[in-house]
């Protein structure tokens, strides 16, 4: 059912309306960067290979095979885009890319360094066609340097940057985050840099080349790791669920689950001591003293929590004034009244896949982000882009199909071609 908040969101302006992004990216890192621009209103054209599409991600279906080739792994970073399938190994395919680049504000790619230059669609070639183009090249290790030729995936990036090495318990293995944070953080930074470059272009008329390294992004978000190394000469060690810089801040096991506790300000720390009935720990009321004595403080909190239920700890935290919350899972968050009231759990009806839900944290008053549809089959929007954007006629498009420059979706996908009056914008929000 329709909801007034959704009605208001869908009736407001989109901040990036009028900007066109040519998204020639694969897997997660690049597609997520373009997705962020798409949910804020940019027209994003996602390019894949005919027939196969992005095989590395369209087949990612955690938890089993979903109906109609639905791929949660790909859907989570590919909403609101137009899908075309162009064979860039053919001269006609390269010509299509050049023509689209001439009409675009941004081009994004995450292929092996030098690939697009060899194909004639690198930044140096495209800026001759469109001097204002913002060209975003997203690599694992950048476009130059000894590691530039190496591929990079999320787990690889978490390992080589040292992020996994500082994650986990002191006597255990380094731990990889199950969320693809290497891809999503790097894609988010790519979107931020794109907007920075577009702002610069608005002032100067000049486009530019953006070289982004996934590894460097992960290194940058490892908070105090590098200053600590520089000043002490010591590496940062694993500390499990204890934060050794903000004490106390931890995840503890309770008698019936897990609880997250944080009590860094002095008044909150003293409140936690009162909850535990521990006057002795109050001698560490100064933050510096708590950091020095963290390995004494944390075991005491862990023991106290283990003898109580999660609800008991949450209730006493509310009464006395420190932070505590149950460790939630995707099911409890999906059903949580707070996140549903704020529409953080964005539930919508996709025109192809039916009822879906994504997190949606884009709460801008005047230009809120929105999700209109999820991914589409390979080549679904070929006609829309070729005819409405590039101005080709139907016979020219048909010729491109005959030459296999253009292609359609996987034959296993039980869908029909969109109607001729398809405007590419159908999507129902409820």
Image (cartoon, rainbow, N blue to C red):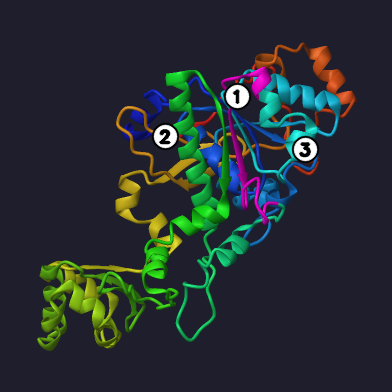
Q: Upstream in the sequence, badge 1 or badge 2?
A: 2
**What numbered label is drawn on residue 49?**
3
Q: CA distance from mark 1 to mark 3?
A: 20 Å
Count of numbered circles on the image? 3
* Relative to 410, 14 lies left or right: left
Q: How would you rate the neighbour count of disc 3 (Cα within 10 Å): few for under 14, some for 14-19, many for 20 or more?
A: many
Residue in the image at 84% along x and 22% along y: 400
Q: Are marks 1 and 2 in contact (CB under 8 Å)?
A: no
Residue in the image at 72% along x and 46% along y: 112
**What numbered label is drawn on residue 424?**
1
Q: Are marks 1 and 3 in contact (CB under 8 Å)?
A: no
Residue 177 position, x and y percent, is: 51, 66
| Residue 183 higher or lower than 289, as above or below | above
Q: Are marks 2 and 3 in contact (CB under 8 Å)?
A: no
Residue in the image at 60% along x and 51% along y: 72
| Residue 378 higher or lower than 417, as above or below | below
- Bounds of the magenta span? 127-148
Mark closer to the observer (1, 3): 3
Q: Upstream in the sequence, badge 1 or badge 3?
A: 3
Residue in the image at 41% along x and 34% along y: 369
Residue 95 position, x and y percent, is: 78, 22
Q: Identify residue for label 2.
A: 369
Q: How would you rate the neighbour count of disc 2 (Cα within 10 Å): few for under 14, some for 14-19, many for 20 or more?
A: many
Q: Which of these two is toward me, 317 or 246?
A: 246
Instruction: Tell whether position 130 is magenta.
Output: yes
Which quadrant of the figure has residue 347? top left
Disc 2 secondary structure class: loop
């Amino acid at each position: 059912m329709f909801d007034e908040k959704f009605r208001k969101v869908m009736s407001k302006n989109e901040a990036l309306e009028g900007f066109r992004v040519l998204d020639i990216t694969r897997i997660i890192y690049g597609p997520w960067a373009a997705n962020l621009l798409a949910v804020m209103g940019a027209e994003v054209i996602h390019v894949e290979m005919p027939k196969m599409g992005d095989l590395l991600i369209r087949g990612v279906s955690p938890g089993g095979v979903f109906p109609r080739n639905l791929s949660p792994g790909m859907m989570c970073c590919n909403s609101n885009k137009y899908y075309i399938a162009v064979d860039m190994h053919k001269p006609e395919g390269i010509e299509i890319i050049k023509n689209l680049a001439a009409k675009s504000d941004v081009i994004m790619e995450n292929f092996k360094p030098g690939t697009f230059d060899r194909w004639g669609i690198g930044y140096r070639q495209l800026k001759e066609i469109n001097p204002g183009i913002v060209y975003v090249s997203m690599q694992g290790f950048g476009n130059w340097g000894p590691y530039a030729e190496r591929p990079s995936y999320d787990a690889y990036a978490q390992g080589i940057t040292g992020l996994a090495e500082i994650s986990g318990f002191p006597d255990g293995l380094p731990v990889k985050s199950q969320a693809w944070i290497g891809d999503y953080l790097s894609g988010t930074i790519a979107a931020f840099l794109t907007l920075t470059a577009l702002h610069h272009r608005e002032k100067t008329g000049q486009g530019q080349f953006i070289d982004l390294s996934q590894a460097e992004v992960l290194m940058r978000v490892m908070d105090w790791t590098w200053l600590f190394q520089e000043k002490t000469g010591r590496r940062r060690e694993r500390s499990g669920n204890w934060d050794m810089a903000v004490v106390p801040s931890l995840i503890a096991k309770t008698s019936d689950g897990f609880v997250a506790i944080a009590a860094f300000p002095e008044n909150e720390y003293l409140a936690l001591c009162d909850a535990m009935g521990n006057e002795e720990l109050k001698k560490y009321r100064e933050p510096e003293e708590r950091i020095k004595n963290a390995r004494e403080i944390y075991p005491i909190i862990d023991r106290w929590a283990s003898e109580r239920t999660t609800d008991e700890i949450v209730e006493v935290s509310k009464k006395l004034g420190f932070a505590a919350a149950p460790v939630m899972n995707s099911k409890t968050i999906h059903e949580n009244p707070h996140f549903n009231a704020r529409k953080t759990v964005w539930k919508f009806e996709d025109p192809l896949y039916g009822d879906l839900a994504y997190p949606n944290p884009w709460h801008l008053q005047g230009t809120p982000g929105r999700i209109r549809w999820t991914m589409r089959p390979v080549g679904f929007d070929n006609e829309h882009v070729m005819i409405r954007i590039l101005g080709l006629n139907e016979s020219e498009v048909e010729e491109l199909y005959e030459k296999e420059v253009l292609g359609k979706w996987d034959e296993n996908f039980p869908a029909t071609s969109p109607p001729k009056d398809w405007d590419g914008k159908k999507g129902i929000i409820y």
